[in-house]
Amino acid sequence: MKSLFLLLSLLFPTLAAASDAANKNHDLTGHWAGFAAIAFFVVAYVLVIFEEQIHLRKSKPVMAAAGVIWILIAIVYSGMGESHAVEVAIRHNFLEYAELFFFLLVAMTYINAMIERGVFDALRDWLVAKGFSYRQLFWFTGFLAFFISPVADNLTTALIMCAVVLSVGAKAPKFVALACVNIVVSANAGGAFSPFGDITTLMVWQNGNVDFWTFFKLFVPSLVNFLVPALIMNFFLPQGNPVAENTEIFEIKTGGLVIVGLFLLTIVTAVSFHNVLHIPPVYGMMFGLAYLKFFGFYLKKRESSLRNVADAMHGPKEDFDIFRKIAQAEWDTLFFFYGVIMAVGGLGFLGYLSLASQFIYVDLGPTTANILVGIMSAIVDNIPVMFAVLTMSPEMNQWQWLLVTLTAGVGGSLLSIGSAAGVALMGQARGQYTFFSHLKWTPAIALGYFASIWVHYLING
C-alpha cells in the first residue's frame, strides 16, 4: 500500500515558522554545496521515476540523497562555526517525519487487518457474482473507488476495484483498459476531498492551513473531476455482460466488520483530538491503535480456544496477531516519505524553496502556480511537490489552499505514472492497462481537471 492510502506529511503547524527560519540562514543557492545538493536530488528522483524499469525500490535513492544533502550542509556550516543551526533544522524535519510516520503506520495497520479478515475480498467477490454488465461494472467500480478512497488509501482501493475488473473482463481488454483509467481517476478524485484520502490532504490539514470540515467543500469539484472523463469514456465501452468464472463469495472472518468500525472510530478520535482538544492528530491515531490491540487480544484468545476444532476441520491456521499487521505495513513507502521530507527540507534550508516561491507564487501568481502544481504532480510525485509548497508557506487565502489541495490530489491522474494507483494498476493489469492506453484519455482527464477547478471557483470562490 503505497498511497494512503495510498493513503501521501506534516503533523505540526510549524512549516511557516520553519520557512521563516530558513530565510534567516545563509543563502547557498549559488554555492558549490547547493549545486551538488540539487544534482544529487535530481539523480535520486530520476531513479524513483524509473523504479518499475530498474526494479530499485524508490526509498533507497531518496534516503541516500537526503543523507548526502545534509552532509553537504553540515560541512559548509561547520566551516562557518554554526553547526548548531544544522542540528536544530534536522531535528525539526525529523520530528515532522516521525509524526507522519506513526500516523500512517496506524492507518496501514488497520487496512492490513481488514485485508487479513477478508473485508475487501468479500466486496470484490460480491461485485463479481452480481453479474453486472460492462457499463454497470464501469460505474460501480468508479463510484466505489471514489467513496472508499477518502477512508482507505487510493492505492488499496484501486487494487481492489482492478481485481474485480480483471475477474470479469478477461475476454474484453478494451473494457479492462477503460475501467482501469476510470478507477485511477476516481480513486485520486475521491482522496482529494478528505483529509484521510491522500497524503497531500493530510499534510495540508495537519499543517493547519485548512480545518477538517472545510475539506469537504472540495466534494463537488472532486466529483466533477471523476464524472467528466467517465461520461466521455462511457460511450466507448463494449456492450453486453461479462461471464464471471468465479461466483463464490468470500466469507468475512470473525471480527472483520468490527475492525472496520474501529477504524472509523479511530478517525473520529484523531479528528476530535485535533479539533476539540487541540492535540496533534497523530496522538488520536495512536490512541485508536489501542482499540485494535485490545480487539486483537480478544480475537487471538477466541481463535486459540477454537484451535482444536479448526485444526480438525481445515488444518492448522495462525492466530490473529496485531504485530504481524504492523510488520506488513508498506515500509518502502514510509521510508520514501522520510527521504522526501529530509531532502526537500535540506533544499529549503539551502534557500532553493524561497527562490522558487518568489518566482512561482509572486511572479506567476497563486492561481497559476497552484494549477501548475497539479500538472507537475502528474510527472513528479505529489508528495514532494506539496511538501515544497508547505515549506515555502506562500501567503494564500483558504480558497487557494483548497485549490492546491485539489490540484495536487487529482493532477496525478493525467498520466498513469502520476500516482501510486496508476503505477500499481499497470503492473496488475499488465499488457491491458498501459502508459499509452491511459495517455489516450489524457485529454478527457485534463478536461475534468480544468472543469473541477472551474467548479471550485463557482461554488467556493
Image (cartoon, helix red, strand yellow):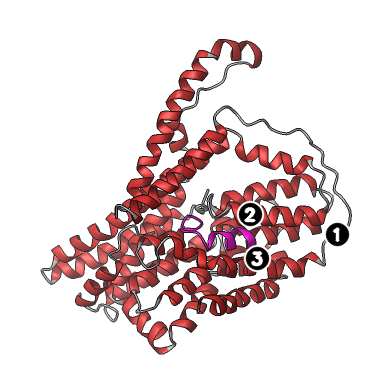
- Is label 2 or label 1 in front? 2
Please tell me which of labels 2 and 3 falls first in the chain.
2
Question: Quick one: SS at disc 1?
Answer: loop
Q: Residue at x 30, y 52 (%)?
A: 277
Task: Give the amino acid type for the residue marked by disc 2 in the picture.
Answer: Ala
Q: Residue at x 53, y 57 (%)?
A: 51
Q: Which residue is mark 1?
A: 238
Q: CA distance from mark 2 to mark 3?
A: 10 Å
Which residue is at the far front? 276
Q: Horizontal and vertical percent for residue 282?
A: 35, 49
Question: Label 1: how many residues lie within 10 Å, few (<14), some (14-19) or many (20+)?
Answer: some
Q: Which residue is mark 2?
A: 145
Highlighted magenta segment, given as a residue range: 185-198
Task: Give the amino acid type for the residue marked by disc 1 in the picture.
Answer: Pro
Q: Which residue is mark 3?
A: 226
Does the magenta run of residues contain 3?
no
Q: Horizontal and vertical percent for residue 269?
A: 39, 46
